[in-house]
Amino acid sequence: MPGRTIPQPVEAVPETAPPIVELANVSKTFGQGRQEVSALEHIRLAIGRGEFVTVVGPSGCGKSTLFNILAGLTEADPGASIRYGGQPRAAKELLGKVAFMPQRDLLLPWRRVVDNAILPLQVEGMSRAEALKRAAPMFPEFGLAGFEKHYPHQLSGGMRQRVALMRTFLFERDLTLLDEPFGALDALTRSLMQRWLLEVWQRHQRTILFITHDVDEAIFLGDRVVVMTARPGRIKLVLDVKLPRPRDAEIVTSPEFIQIKRQVLAAIEEESLKSFQQATGG
Ligand code: ADP
Ligand code: MG
């Protein structure tokens, strides 16, 4: 109809809450000249509140670097945009914004379990008494009741991982980063820990970004699986995992699971081959 103007909305108000974190154009180069290594290239990723997002990719593709950037420990190359809760953030503002369990999360051998668990709260300035009060109810939940006063060397590998996880969960942040937390565990312990982690995630309503090199683990845990390319790490593929929750061990045999696994494996195999060729100079 000529002459008639259609009223336009002044501003489109998003119906959903802004993502917890939004990355755009995140790249990272280490070193200079002939030593230069491009670890990450143009990462664009948004994580919604309450999501469980898993990241898989060949070794050396920049997964841990991405976490270090999110945690404010490594600065991205200029031009990157990182937003938390809708607000743009400079690298130095990111420190302490997330709960972060690094890939090699060593417990301090001279601190008892409980004192390892409350360490980040103390670093933040909380008194020991207050931190202990917060930690107390979490010991049974993390399968550590009765082990509060033990030293790390007195625990099994699975228990030490639970102490590190408990420490990460005690540090309540909008976003929790877990870098291959079950990498060193045997298959049975690992599968128990995965189901347990899903329960903890749902009970505490956290938002989790989780790195793994285990495709089954990525699909079993995730709402979405992010597959990265060989170095320089880019996002190759993001798959929605629409498997019902709660998930049990049997779900890995369902046709839906196998279908997703095929796609992830095909993408990873392509990238692992590239990464192998890089390493062998082929
Ligand atoms: P992933 O966790 O996917 O295995 P990383 O993020 O640890 O990969 O490493 C990605 C690439 O960046 C690797 O080639 C690694 O050697 C390099 N790298 C990581 N951190 C540094 C650093 N601090 N200095 C120089 N190179 C680094
Ligand atoms: Mg890593």
Image (tube, rainbow, N blue to C red):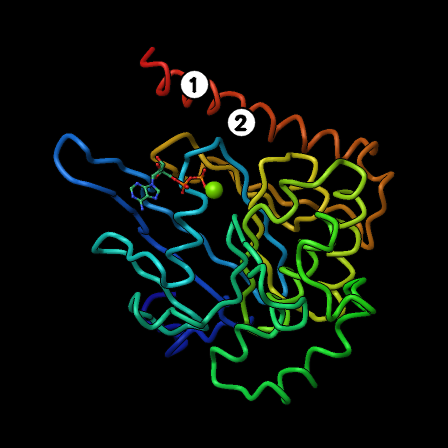
Q: Position of residue 27 (x, y in %)?
A: 30, 47
Tell which residue pokes out farthest to the front in this image: 110
Mark 2 neighbour class, 10 Å CA radius: few under 14, some 14 to 19, many 20 or more:
some
Count how many numbered circles sit on residues in the image. Answer: 2
Residue at (41%, 35%) from the top-left corner? Answer: 61
Q: Which residue is mark 2?
A: 267
Quarter of the image where ligand 1 sits: top left
Residue at (68%, 55%) from the top-left corner? Answer: 160
Which quadrant of the view contains residue 168? Answer: bottom right
Residue at (42%, 34%) from the top-left corner? Answer: 60
Amino acid carrying label 1: it is: Phe
Mark 2–mark 1 CB contact (< 8 Å): no
Q: Which residue is mark 1?
A: 276
Residue at (67%, 82%) from the top-left corner? Answer: 132
User: What secondary structure is found at the residue carrying circle 2?
Assistant: helix
Q: Position of residue 131 (x, y in %)?
A: 62, 83
Q: Position of residue 91 (x, y in %)?
A: 30, 65
Along the line of sight, the residue nearer the viewer: 238 or 67: 67
Amino acid carrying label 2: it is: Ala
User: Which of label 2 and label 1 is nearer to you?
Assistant: 1
Q: Position of residue 121 (x, y in %)?
A: 54, 78
Along the line of sight, the residue nearer the viewer: 264 or 60: 60
